[in-house]
Structures are given as C-alpha cells and as structure tokens.
C-alpha cells in the first residue's frame, strides 16, 4: 500500500491512522501540490486525476481517494479501535461528523488558500471562524474527542485541518476547548511520529 501525501495537508489525517495502526505495511510518496508532481518526478494526475491528496494505492494498483473513504477503510482494516462498528448509530455519527469535516469545515478553507498576496483576509476568514466556533462548542460538555471519550479517525481529520489556523494568522485562543483538543491529540505518540515523518513541528506542545 502506498499513501500519497503532502506535508501538513489534510492527508496528515490518513498518515496518522497508519501510525495508530500496528504493523501495517505501507510506503509514503510525497506530492508537491503546487506542481502536482510526485517526488519521483511522476505527474500526480496520473495517480489521482482529481489532483488532490490523500490517495491510497493498493499493491494491485487500485486507487482509493477522498479522506472520508480512506480514513474509514484504514480504520476498518488496520485500526478498528478508531471507529465504531458498521451498521450502528455510532458509526452513522462518525459519518455525520466526517462529512461535516470534509464538506463544510475543510471546504471553508478553500478561499484562504487562494487569497492574493496582501489581500484583506477578512471575508475569507469569516466562514472558517464560524466553523471553528461550532467545532469548539462541541467540546462544551467536556468530551475529549469528537465522538465522546474515545479517539476516532474523525479526530485525526479535525487535527490535521486545525493545524492550519496557526499558519494563516488565526489564533485558536478564541477557541480554548478546540485548542485543548489539539494539544491532547498532538500528545499521542502516533501523531508525534506522523508529524516527524512529514517534517512538521509540534504546535500545541504544553509547557
Ligand atoms: N475531497 C478531497 C479533498 C482533498 C484536498 O482538498 N486535498 C488538498 C490538500 S488538503 C489538495 O490536495 N489540494 C491540491 C489540489 O486539489 O490540487 C478529500 O477529502 O480527500
């Protein structure tokens, strides 16, 4: 199995799940998303015609894309403690939150990535701030993770995308429960290992 990823992109989520799983045979292939080139020089559109990471390529060449699908596939096969059983209401809850993360939260970032240099970010930030506020409110009942007190594949997705505010001048100080969630997830050995493998620094380490 080969995971196509780009450092710090949403694919970090799927990469974390590979580290959470025990003894999964996989390789990583780094993609330059500006050029859509794999580090081997291959045109990334030949792997995923949509041009986006993550893409998971099986040994027989079959390709699986879309974070929501890749996360659940990896969890079901290699890290079953990270997701509820298929067919349960809890699994539907996982899909509910994964879908929100993909279609609403992750998507709300798109204008931020296309801001012209020096442009006023206020309008582009508005939808992101609204989503951060909603996500922060989910932790008001003192839950540790999105689904309650057990860590799930959805938390890896929330974690990967919520590293971005720091890089766009948005402080998480206004979202303290979400910030505490980020520190909690970042403290996991598998998360630290994935960050290190992607050459990323820890942003939420507590003193
Ligand atoms: N719907 C896809 C979106 C993935 C996505 O937007 N990936 C970004 C990185 S976070 C990307 O590869 N962007 C480059 C591009 O689309 O050309 C998913 O959920 O996996």
Image (cartoon, rainbow, N blue to C red):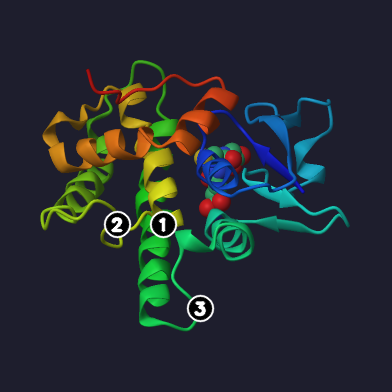
Up the image or down, 64 lies above or below 109; here it is below
What secondary structure is found at the residue carrying circle 3? loop
Image disc number at residue 86: 3
Name the residue located 42 percent from the left edge and 82 percent from the top edge: 88
Q: Disc 1, ligand 1: is the CB inside 8 Å?
A: no
| Number of numbered tags placed on the structure image | 3
Contact, CB < 8 Å: mark 3 with mark 1?
no
x%, y% of residue 16? 52, 42
Q: Label 2 crowding class (10 Å Cα cut-off): few <14, some 14-19, many 20+?
A: many
Determine the quadrant in which ligand 1 lies.
top right
The quarter holding residue 128 reads: top left
Cα gap from disc 3 to disc 1, whole angstroms = 14 Å
Image disc number at residue 49: none
Image disc number at residue 146: 2
Q: Which quadrant, please, contains the C terminus?
A: top left
Up the image or down, 207 lies above or below 38; here it is above
Cα gap from disc 2 to disc 1, whole angstroms = 8 Å
């Amino acid at each position: 199995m080969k995971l196509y990823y780009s450092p710090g992109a949403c694919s970090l989520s799927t990469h974390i799940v590979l580290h959470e799983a025990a003894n999964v045979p996989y390789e990583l292939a780094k993609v330059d998303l500006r050029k859509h080139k794999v580090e081997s020089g291959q045109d990334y559109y030949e792997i995923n015609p949509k041009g986006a990471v993550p893409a998971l390529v099986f040994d027989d060449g079959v390709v699986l894309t879309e974070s929501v699908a890749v996360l659940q596939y990896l969890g079901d096969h290699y890290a079953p403690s990270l997701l509820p059983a298929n067919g349960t209401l809890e699994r539907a809850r996982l899909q509910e939150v994964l879908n929100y993360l993909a279609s609403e939260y992750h998507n709300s970032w798109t204008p931020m990535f296309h801001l012209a240099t020096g442009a006023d970010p206020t309008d582009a930030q508005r939808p992101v701030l609204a989503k951060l506020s909603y996500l922060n409110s989910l932790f008001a009942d003192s839950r540790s993770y999105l689904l309650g007190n057990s860590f799930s594949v959805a938390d890896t997705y929330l974690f990967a995308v919520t590293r971005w505010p720091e890089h766009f001048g948005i402080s998480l100080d206004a979202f303290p429960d979400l910030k505490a969630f980020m520190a909690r997830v970042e403290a996991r050995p598998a998360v630290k290992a994935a960050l290190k493998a992607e050459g990323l620094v820890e942003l939420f380490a507590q003193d």
